[in-house]
Amino acid sequence: MTTIEKKTDSKKIANWSLGIMGMGFLATMPINDSITGKLLQGGFEAGLIGGLADWFAVTALFRHPLNIKIPHTALLPKNRERIIQSILHVLENDWLTKESIVNKINHVQIAHLLLDKVETELQSNEMKRQLQKAIIYLSSNLDLNPFKPQLEMWAKDLVNDIKAEYVVQKAIDKALENQMDEKIYTMSLKVLDSKLSDQKTRDNITKLIINAIEKNSENKIFGFALKSFKTTVSGKMTDITNGLITELLIDLNSETSENRKKIIGYIRTEMEQIKNNESVIQQIEAIKQSSVNEYDMKPLFETLNKRIQNILLAYVQQENFIEDILSPIINKGIAKLKEHPTALSKLDAWIKGEILDIIEKNHQKIGQLVKDNLDKMTNDEITVLLENKIGNDITWIRVNGALCGSLIGLALTGIKLITG
């Protein structure tokens, strides 16, 4: 059983015409003694013969009449391959030649039509819904991993292009702006205060002072006197040292201390000098480049990928994203493009070039596609398909055969009666 539904309406007229001729022939047999009867019978007889002959001829195109395998019948099924090759030849070399397709394409403003189509479709709610759905899907499946090598190289080049001198200068300026010199002083003073508050440290300082005096005394008389002095006042030396350290710490902690101001000024001067210290800057530059080149950016890209994905999703999932954000951007871009004929011409040329390239590479596949589809069909399916497509013409061939045969029969019968 074929998958193509067979249309029978087109055959009804032909069958009726053949039936009328047959019934007319039978009906006139009893009255064929009269002239009128002979004329009518001759007409119906010839019409019946013509109708039967055309029925046989038409049927023989598609199948064996009455399933009797008469020679030179069922012409289409028997010549299926040749007919298909003929169709493909005409299709490829006459109807759909590359030249004809190219000529048609060159006369169409594809870019303009495409832009107009985009503008029209953007007004459709269904198009907006599908477009947003597609963008959400793409955002949800965003994956930067395929681009990781290029992105990593780009990121490292970007960081390495930032000069250490610029970073150092900006860092020191910002540090001084935030009074980092005073903070360094305060931090250092806390460490010093902590150390000097320890009595053991103070005793060691006292010993160092006395040892220094002893080592620097070259005069024997002075050395003897110093030894006597040390024996007499060594206990008081500790008190003197403690007092001096305490006074020093009090002075350094005072907001109005000149020593404090000098030390802070020294720190500031040293920090300012670092900005122009080529040796320090070169060392920092070398450390920076080495650190950047060795840095594993895999965790960074994983975080970046997720962050970009979340930002995009939150952005494109807005209820009116297409209507309020994307559509105006696209329409504005289309309007600007239409205002520049040169750019529009280039776009049109590019689109046509791509289409022509596809045609050039795949033109032979047009015939192959037709052949593949025809090869999938059985002989019965092709027969029914052709009968359906040209059924009206076939119907009128049979009707015309019956009518012409009838008229010729009438004429011939009349001639016979006249000539006696």
Image: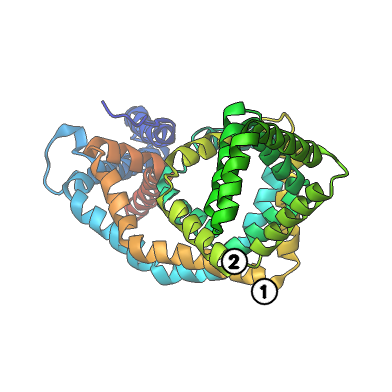
State the CA–CA distance, disc 2 to disc 1. Answer: 9 Å
Task: Name the residue at 40% across, 50% down.
Answer: 294
Q: Which of the two residues, 185 or 325, is positioned nearer the viewer here? A: 185
Task: Name the residue at 48% across, 41% down.
Answer: 301
Task: Name the residue at 59% across, 50% down.
Answer: 213
Work out whether 106 lies above or below 51: below
Q: Secondary structure at mark 1?
A: helix
Q: Which of the two residues, 2 or 324, is positioned nearer the viewer here? A: 324
> Dot 2 corresponds to which residue?
347
Q: Which mark is residue 151?
A: none
Q: What percent of the width, then of the height, locates residue 111?
A: 61, 62
Q: Which residue of the protein is positioned furthest toward the right in this rendering?
A: 256
Residue 384 falls in image quadrant: top left
- Amino acid found under the numbered disc labelled 1: Thr
> Dot 1 corresponds to which residue?
342
Is residue 135 visible in the rendered structure shown here? no
Question: On the picture, is 125 further left or further right than 390?
Answer: right
Q: What percent of the width, then of the height, locates residue 8?
A: 39, 30
Is residue 17 visible in the rendered structure shown here? yes
Q: Is tag 2's residue or tag 1's residue first in the polypeptide sequence?
A: 1
Q: Which of the two residues, 122 or 393, is positioned nearer the viewer here? A: 122
- Amino acid found under the numbered disc labelled 2: Leu
Q: Secondary structure at mark 2?
A: helix
Work out whether 388 lies above or below 173: above
Q: Which of the two residues, 310 or 412, is positioned nearer the viewer here? A: 310
